[in-house]
Image (tube, coloured by chain):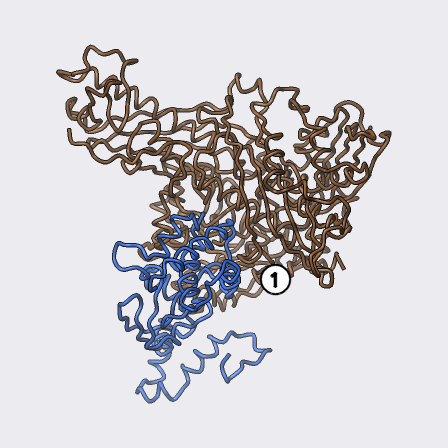
Chain colours: A brown, B blue
Amino acid sequence: MEKAFIKKVQIGDAMDRVDARLKVSGAARYAAEYTLKSVVYGVLVTSTIAKGSIKEMDTRAAEKAPGVLAIINHKNAPKVPGHQAGTDNEGSRVYGQEFRLFYDNKIYHNDQPIALAIASTPEQAEHAASLIKVHYAQEKHQTNSKANTSNAITPARGKDYSRGTAYAFKNAPVNLELEYGTPIQVHNPMEPHATTAVWEGATKVTVYNKTQATKLSQQEIMKAFDLKEENVQAISPFVGGAFGSSSRVWPQEMAAIMGAKVTGKPVKVALKRDQVFNMVGYRPRSIQKIGIGATAEGILTGITHEAFTSTSQYEQFTERIVDPTKTLYNCPNLNTAYKLIPLDMSTPCWTRGPGETSGSFALESAMDELAYALNIDPLALRLKNYAPSDPEKNLPWSSNYLKECYQMGADRFGWNKRTPTPGSMRKDEWQVGMGMAAGIYKSERDAASAIATVLANGSVVVQSAVADVGPGSATIFTQIAADVLAMDVKQVTFEWGNSKLPKAPGQFGSHTTASVGSAIYEVCTLLKKKLQELAITMPNSELARAQQNDLVVEEGTVGLKNKQIQLSYADILKSHALPQVQVSTESKGGGPEQEKYSGKSFCANFVEVRVHSLTGEVRVNRVVSAVDCGRVVNKKTATSQVYGSITWGIGIALMEEAKLDHRYGRHLNNDLAEYHVPTCADVPPIEVLFVDKPDPVIDPMGAKGIGEIPLVGFSAAIANAVYHATGKRIRELPITPDKLL
Amino acid sequence: MTDHQPDDNNSEGLDESRRDFLKHSSLLTAMALTPSTVLKAASSQWDERLAGAFEKISLSLEVNGTKHSLAIEPRVTLLDLLREQLALTGTKKGCDYGQCGACTVHVDGRRVLACMSLAVMQEGRKVTTIEGLAGGDTLHPMQEAFVKHDGLQCGYCTPGQIMSAVACIREGHANSAEEIQEYMSGNLCRCGAYPNIVAAIMEVKKEGKKL
């Protein structure tokens, strides 16, 4: 047998991305980039009022405009059976009535899509859209969270939580009662949301969409249009960033599907940048009250966390805003309450660290404030209150290396060089400050399926419907497969991002590696066993008398440990005259064994900032992020994930804020010049430290989640550093210069 | 905007007015069309086609070494020409207002935002997109460096970053990490690949190859 050079890749290696070449050469195709024959273009027209109804829509000029094929609105839109059926609170992921595109003349929020202009070219569609004239019956709207806390409701799917004595912080020797706020943050992925839809006949539709969950897209479209599973396909291998904003079916998908139905042609609908601000979700505004109390020695005795977030008038979007508070520290008396403020806005949506990010800003700021009140080092205070087990569930951690994170991070950062007094560290005209914060995020495993096929030439194809919106999941799954099957990674192809592939959960909630990775680990282990069996049973096998336990797979072969016999996968298939061997698996989510433990990822972030004493400008000098995400599957992509969270944290702490003009209920800064996201110059050197110890419970790779954990607490670390630099405590994000002067 | 501003109170759109003008203009008379022919043309939307033909402007340009002779509407941006008419979708649309850098291409060797450039203004120019940066199947050194340093996650800003990165070195603005950060700040990345992008550019600069 001729031996090829084997490039062995193992779990843990810093392998290059499998799709990097496609992405750097411009060959990766995103939702609006499929060159389909006779494709036409749809442009959404949006409302200019926040509440009321459409009295009249004059589409005559638009219909006559050159190249126009159709103008669709509530009067002529095809009926959507799922929309006619009304509210489904049994099956919906968000409580309430989902937004129904072109369903009636009601306006629930500003920039609500109310018509679709379809034409032969993008320019014609854009022009036609501009010719549509709308007259409204306007009603008084509410878009201001702060002014509407008295109208807050208790969410149907939310329970207040209490352990020990509620409001015990009030009786603590040292206690604080503080209020924090975070603004609306818009995901603003670089690729605006887009969909190209194609019908085949009246019962079969294909959508090339931007989704974190091809199977969820498929199911939602099946439900809406009353179609069979085999007749709905969602294709989405490349997604230009999502961060939670592509976890539901949105108006651009519905519009493209309706448009394609009406015109009989493939229809492409791409949102404009301003349209992503109030149509495809956002992180809601939060208003939070924290009461925190401790003994003089710094032992926590009570925490109360009451949170409000905004939602729409038609759905109750809830997030995990009080969750970190329940579990991060060993506090015996703790109670949380959570209320929603319904506004005349579109429904918010999960946004990187949904809930944890806003909630941890309040909690980790309050811990810092308590540390100052106690005159204890903020890191020492956290170590004193380390939770040895999950205080909410009363379960042992599946693994917890938070103390290691504290230690590694503090050592690398040089936390001991910090002088505690605010304003004590200056450099020229800059006030320098150091801050830190801890983070906790759920780490779970969901059910997932996978298929692995070895082909006649010995190469392997592994398939899952999972999305890869940027974390590098396709890469690490290729890596897991190559590791388990002990073969050259170049001989492994992973196929993803298509709803016709084996079922996978959505790529959100930091559970993709654990869930889909487990399925791939399992299916490749099955394939390995199958190949071993086939090696033994092949005609005239040299291994005929071997036991399966004696066999090893390495370098794409099945053989004996002493390497005296090695049969390649290709030869095994050839001798059985098999064109391919395929195995599939359905990997279970968290079973009874896992329910005995609490699975979480942990982190400790250390930040140094400088604040200009005259202008109030805040710059981040450096960041050390120490993370316990279990075993790191790929150091390169995992490090990039941490960079991503830190970049987001800098944006959230210092610049991101979607501002509304409440007089009109409209966004003021709905573009990328006015809505500031971090640029290259805003991101300082980031040192990423991984504990890199396997979690023994959650999945066979030992991995926990990585996509969100470094963001949890990060904005507080910056706020704490700003306080240390200036003595000014900013409790309302973002920390802009006006708040520091 | 044209020199002939439409009346703000005129509820008809620009296009409508333009077509009315065409229908009644001496241009049509000069083409020896009788009034009845004009009416017939109007009813079968020939006027639209006719107007469309008149509205198109010829454009010759070179994209990635290929010469194109096109007839396009003057309102078409270079970005939409590339993406929708030439099927070069490697150049990305992120904002349409020149705020994100995703559409960065090279025009006559200089970095340009394709969404802010009308296609008809590129007459006689040489445009290079991400698809034409490297020759054949090999990658450009900057593309190689982005792969090696993981200078990308979702990949959507990546072509624009790479086109800017190449220009950044050519311009002589890649002499330190800080300088690169400043001169790459017109290209937004939402995934957080900046540190890796800077590392990739530093490496290519250090190699000193002619880009």
Q: Is residue A661 left or right of residue A228?
A: right
- Quarter location, residue A546: top left
- Quarter location, residue A6: top left
Q: Secondary structure at mark 1?
A: loop
Q: Residues within 10 Å of mark 1 (few under 14, many from 20)?
A: some
Residue A669 in percent (x, y) is at 62, 60
Residue A443 in percent (x, y) is at 55, 30
Residue A208 in percent (x, y) is at 40, 47
Q: Which residue is mark 1?
A: A674
**The residue marked by circle 1 belongs to what chain?**
A
Residue A720 in percent (x, y) is at 71, 45
Q: Is residue A573 left or right of residue A309?
A: left
**Residue A46, relative to residue A130: is it above or below?**
above
Is any atom of residue A264 visible in this view? no
Q: Amino acid at mark 1?
A: Glu
Name which residue lies at 29% across and 36% down: A7
Name which residue lies at 46% across and 75% down: B15
